[in-house]
Amino acid sequence: MFGMIFIFAFAVICSLIFSLILRYTSVQESSIQYITTALSFVGLFGGGFLSGGKRKEKGWLIGGTTGLIYSLIVFLAQYLGYDRLFDAEQLIYHTCYTLIAMMGGILGVNLASGNSRTA
């Protein structure tokens, strides 16, 4: 739950900043597309990290679940609000979002539990 709150709070803050930039400057939406995608990955990684750190076990599972719940919420908003399904590009993005959240969950568990292995 904390991970989802972080993801959506991060998304709202980033959306507000980008909307102000787009409104009050001459920047076009197409020029910040990659920045928006990168910040989405940062948000999902942070959400997975926070979820894994709170849970302290099975980071891949809790991070993946966080990513899947995020994708489900976005899918439902898109389907119910705009009557559109995910296209191939969105499926790739949301698969990557889930994988990034998994990586965040794994790292969150390992840093929160303090267990580290040495070679």
Image: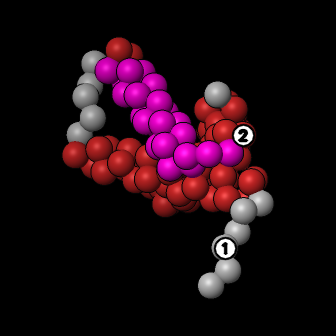
Q: Nearer the viewer, residue 30 or 57?
A: 57
Number of other residues with Cα within 10 Å of mark 1, as a class: few under 14, some 14 to 19, many 20 or more = few
Specify whether 117 is left or right of 89. right
Whichever of callouts 1 and 2 sits on the residue coming sooner in the sequence is: 2
The secondary structure that most of the magenta stretch takes on is helix
Rendering coords of residue 108 (x, y %):
67, 53
Is residue 55 placed above or below 92 in the rendered structure? above
Is residue 82 placed above or below 96 in the rendered structure? above
Instruction: Point out the image quarter for the N terminus.
Output: top right
Specify whether 26 is left or right of 31. right
Asked if the magenta segment contains residue 30, the reply would be: no
Instruction: Measure the alpha-carbon separation of dots 1 and 2.
Output: 21 Å
Please say whether residue 26 is visible from this viewpoint: no
Q: Which mark is residue 117?
A: 1
Name the kind of residue labelled 1 in the image: Arg
Give the SS element for disc 2: helix
Is residue 36 placed above or below 86 in the rendered structure? below
Asked if the magenta segment contains residue 77, the reply would be: yes
Q: Which mark is residue 54?
A: 2
Rendering coords of residue 52 (x, y %):
64, 45
Rendering coords of residue 69 (x, y %):
47, 30
Specify whether 82 is left or right of 65. left
At x 66%, y 52%, the residue is 109
At x 45%, y 25%, the residue is 73
Please say whether residue 110 is visible from this viewpoint: yes
Residue at the far left in the pictured view: 88
Q: Nearer the viewer, residue 46 or 107?
A: 107
Give the SS element for disc 1: loop
At x 61%, y 32%, the residue is 4
- Chain part drawn in magenta: 56-79
Instruction: Give the quarter of the image for residue 7.
Output: top right
